[in-house]
Image (tube, grey):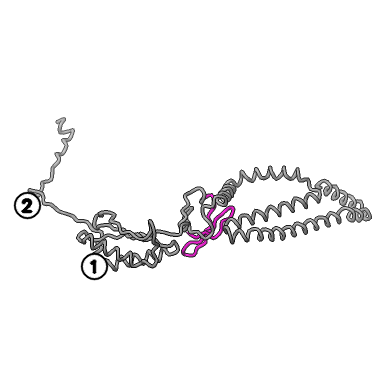
Amino acid sequence: MAQSVGDTLSTLIEQMQAGDYEGLTATMTQNVVPGLLAAAIGLGVIFIGYLVASYISRIISGPICRRVDQTLGKFIGRLVFYSILAGVTAAVLSKLGAPLGGLAAMLAAAGFAVGLAFQGTLSNFASGVLMMVFRPFKVGDFINAGGVAGTVNEIDLFTTTLDTPDNRRIIVPNSSIAGGTIENISHHAHRRVEVVVGVDYSANQDETRAALTRAAESLSDVMIPGDDRGYAVVLSGLGDSAVEWKVRLWVASSNYWPAHEALTGAVKRNLDAVEIGIPFPQMDIHLHRVAGDDDGSQPTPRQRPRPTRRDAIAG
């Protein structure tokens, strides 16, 4: 095809230089116009293939997004779209007489060079495919990955888009996510709220436990009951300036932060009701007087002898 185009152009230039306008018209009619018409038809077929690929990808990805998973549905939709478009383009080029064998060899060589130049991009692509297959998280999950915490908005083949709690859009490369630790915070339906509080050493232990128990039971409307659920009041340790307690409460993952705030306020109110204080961090310093300091005597400074001059020793 490339050779025929080159020959046609050479013939046209020679006819124009020789002034053979009849031959120029015949060449345009027999070679150039049919070639342009075939190219226009080929572009039209590719455009129709683009529309068909978009329609079929939507039909296939729609039920998967609704019934299975939105992330997997989008991935399969893109895969179907590009596969159909690539097949239509290859068929059109074959009909137009393009040497697909030589073109494939050129694309392979160019792909190798591009792969060496874009190793990071290919790494992001491979990480995106792995995340699509193993699905450590999905769209809508709240995760902590790649040094960023946020809600997953979209998982692409090269990047993952997150929305932070303060409404910032952050785009993270897939290799940064797949190469590190992924914390899927909203994966489970239930989460445990834990409030740590320190009370005075003089406070009665039974009264403190009873006050903290009332605080936990005051949130029974949001508490998840059952085995290994409910609430717990734990004496966790003896700190430097306070006795440390932990109040734990199981709630729905979607209700974690409101329940955390409510439990913290309930702990403070119930401790104040029985007059159990929450001490500030403090340190006791004890001063001891050393024997011999009562006479008021001051230590005498030690005097260093001045060195003898060399000339005085010589004299």
> Is the C terminus in the top left, top right, bottom left or bottom right quadrant?
top left
Image location (x, y in percent) of residue 207: 23, 63
Query: Mark 1 belongs to which amino acid?
Result: Val
Circles 2, 1 touching at the beta carbon (< 8 Å)? no
- Which residue of the protein is positioned furthest toward the front in this rendering? 226
> In the image, which disc is placed on residue 49?
none
- Is residue 105 positioned above or below 85 on the image? above
Residue 167 in the magenta stretch? The answer is yes
Report whether 147 appears left or right of 212. Answer: right
Please name the residue shown 58% across and 60% down the image.
67
> In the image, which disc is placed on residue 274?
1
Q: Depth check: 226 or 81 in front?
A: 226
Q: Which residue is mark 2?
A: 294
Query: Mark 2 belongs to which amino acid?
Result: Asp
Q: Within 10 Å of the Cα at label 1, are there few (<14), some (14-19), or many (20+) other Cα atoms?
A: few
Q: Bounds of the magenta span?
A: 150-176
